[in-house]
Amino acid sequence: MSKYKKIESALIHGGIYGDKQTGAVNVPIYQTSTYEQRGLGENTGWEYSRTGNPTRAALEALIAELESGKAGFAFGSGMAAITAVLSLFKAGDKIIISSNVYGGTFRVLDKIFNNFNISYSIEDTTNPEALESKITSDVKAILIESPANPLLTVTDIAAIADIAKKKGILSIVDNTFMTPYLQRPIELGVDIVIHSATKYLGGHSDVVSGLVVVNDDELADRLAFIQNSTGGVLGPFDSFLLIRGIKTLGVRLDRHVENAEKVAAYLKNHKAVKNVYYPGLPDAQGYEINKKQAKNGGAMISFELYENYDIAKFFSALNLIALAESLGGVESLACHPASMTHASIPYEVRQKVGITDGLIRLSIGIENIDDLIEDLEQAIGESEER
């Protein structure tokens, strides 16, 4: 748990703050691969930067504190973080995943871990009662996103954690979309939290990184062994950038969400828009559950235009909002999940879970809201088939 009552203070002062030796308020960048030993079998606590680095350790302590966990781990990407967590399992184990998750999560399970006889099943985790009947003896974990990518479906995190504990399996939540500023799954009973820290935690589209937090000493020991053995660690400079980004997470997300709520309302009332997916809307799926477990609806929105609108023209007509992979930076981004973030998921699976070819995903940035809505308005207008 954090020593600070409010997370806004913990974002800035949490973890390992500053440098006691010099008084610097920022943790130094320990740009070193190795450390001089005092003698045989005697060191300063540091041996080799794959095993541990003071800058990375400061970041890992910070994310553990923010997520109310016991230990944090920093990796070279969000997928490296997910891969490390999945490496906790062995041949014959099965992982249940939400019916819409990031395409990279599906791909690594389907194309990599399947080769080692670690299987998966895609289930509707928004119905915890029905999900419980799907937990067979070979299921060892439930991995969810809430809100999920890209349809923003909401799963009751506490209910999933309760089911996992009852069945003696692990509960894992990818908290990328919400961050600990808006939602803290470990406080809801979850075992493992994953972040693509490339997104909101970094916040400036200038670093690729992944973080994991666990709430159990044994899990921490196992994951530390995997991190050191497989070596997909985050470098010291990127760790520094991430600590710097986290310091402004609160003020950035306040503006992200303020803009997103206005964009969602605008889209909801637009004659060209067929569906809007945003958990902050009162009629959204899971609105009440999300309100119970998260501070607000976040800053990700997905929507579909009616059939007489050409989404290719929509994307090409955008001026302020960039067509790009990723999310969570200060700039607004538009994405076509079917051909970009979720292209690795087979067409028939995408259709089954509702990731249609007409789905548009927006990561709402911190620009002026009038400029954002004006850009969407003119792009929608340009896309209408006349």
Image (tube, grey):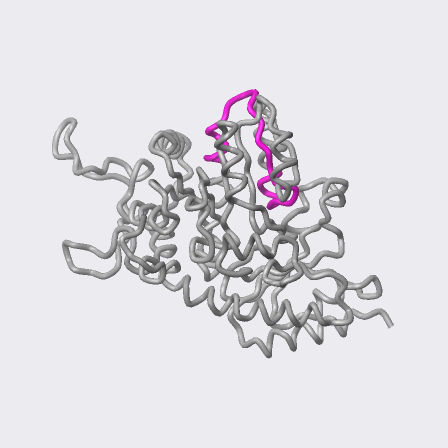
Number of callouts: 0
Q: Quadrant of the C terminus?
A: bottom right
Report x, y in % for residue 128. Answer: 60, 39
Residue 227 falls left or right of residue 315 = left
Magenta region includes residue 133: no
Residue 31 falls left or right of residue 370 = left
Rendering quarter of residue 6:
bottom left
Magenta region includes residue 90: yes
Return the residue found at the far left.
39
Rendering quarter of residue 324:
bottom right
Identify whether 44 is placed above or below 261. above
Identify whether 22 is placed above or below 173. below
Residue 249 falls left or right of residue 119 = left
Identify whether 386 is placed above or below 63. below
Report x, y in % for residue 142. Answer: 55, 35
Residue 127 falls left or right of residue 14 = right
The residue nearer to you, when weighing 13 against 334, is 13
Return the residue found at the far right.
386
The residue nearer to you, when weighing 264 against 285, is 285
Part of the protein shown in magenta: 83-106
